[in-house]
Image (cartoon, helix red, strand yellow):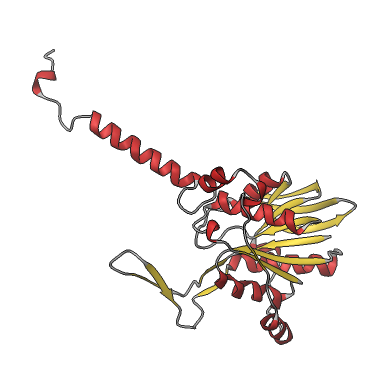
Amino acid sequence: MKVVVCIKQTPSTTAVLVVDGSGNVSWDDPGGKPNVLNPWDEYTVEEGVRLKENHGATDVIALTVGPEESQDALKTCLAMGCTEAVLVSDPALQGLDSLGTARALAAAIEKAGEVQVAIFGRQAIDGDTGQTPVQVARKLGWTPLTFVSAIKEMGDGQITVERLLDDGKETVTASLPVVISTVKEINEPRYPSLMGIRKANRATIPAWSAPRPIWGWMAAPAAARWIGPRSTPSRRARAAWKSLRQIRSKRRPRSWPTSCLRRR
């Protein structure tokens, strides 16, 4: 049984952001690491490794969609105990929103084969949407289990988890495969060992590109519209609202002429 841990490389929480006159954003960190493994994903990686140690998972695959620099975050996952790491990187996948990222991750999970559990952190500290786990579950047709604070049992094609709710906890049993999003109460992430760091530094991480059409999710023109860097659903929605506001502003006069006023 394979477990996929979906992670993201994000700016360091101590990074200093700088915006130049052209609106370009850059950042640097006093500690020398401007980009790090998303803090919420540290709990995800730890839980994936524990599934291998305690519940019989054969492989724990760290997976991310991003530029070549994201290999640093994947190497952190390898140092923590993941058995494999895969980077999905392609110019066609730049500038994705959560839906486009979910499509790419779902296709990569299917390509990995024999995956029964996909684990996500609660959210990324840069986007903060928290939507990607549920969107991936929808694309795969798997059961989503959100806000999981403990994995109780796993076996015989089923998994039992504890979910953290606003007013208490809930125990849920679902059939595999599932997509899980975790909260920080689920565990205490381990520190990478020195041996793990050395192995991770020597590891060669495969980079998967996006064939045309994008992994068969849709035809190439549609893929360019839905997944491409210049047009994603949220961007199209914002553009539509902007156009609508412009139309309304043209139709509505700034002030009504006195001739339009009626005496009562």
- Residue drawn where x is 19% and y is 30% of the image: 253
- Residue drawn where x is 70% and y is 69% of the image: 85
The percent coordinates of residue 114 (x first, y second) are: 81, 56
In the image, residue 63 sits, relative to residue 96, either above or below, namely below
Question: Residue 236 appears in which quarter of the rendering?
Answer: top left
Q: How many marks?
A: 0
In the image, residue 193 sits, relative to residue 54, either above or below, namely below
Question: Residue 206 appears in which quarter of the rendering?
Answer: bottom right
Q: Is residue 147 visible?
A: no
The percent coordinates of residue 30 (x first, y second) are: 45, 82
| Quadrant assignment for the C terminus | top left
In the image, residue 58 sits, relative to residue 93, either above or below, namely below
Residue at the limit of the structure toward the left, as seen here:
258
In the image, residue 58 sits, relative to residue 96, either above or below, namely below
- Residue drawn where x is 58% and y is 50% of the image: 131
Question: Residue 139 appears in which quarter of the rendering?
Answer: top right
The percent coordinates of residue 256 (x first, y second) are: 15, 26
The percent coordinates of residue 258 (x first, y second) are: 9, 22
Q: Which is more toward the observer, 80 or 66?
A: 66
Residue at the limit of the structure toward the right, as seen here:
156
Q: Is residue 201 visible?
A: yes
| Quadrant assignment for the N terminus | bottom right
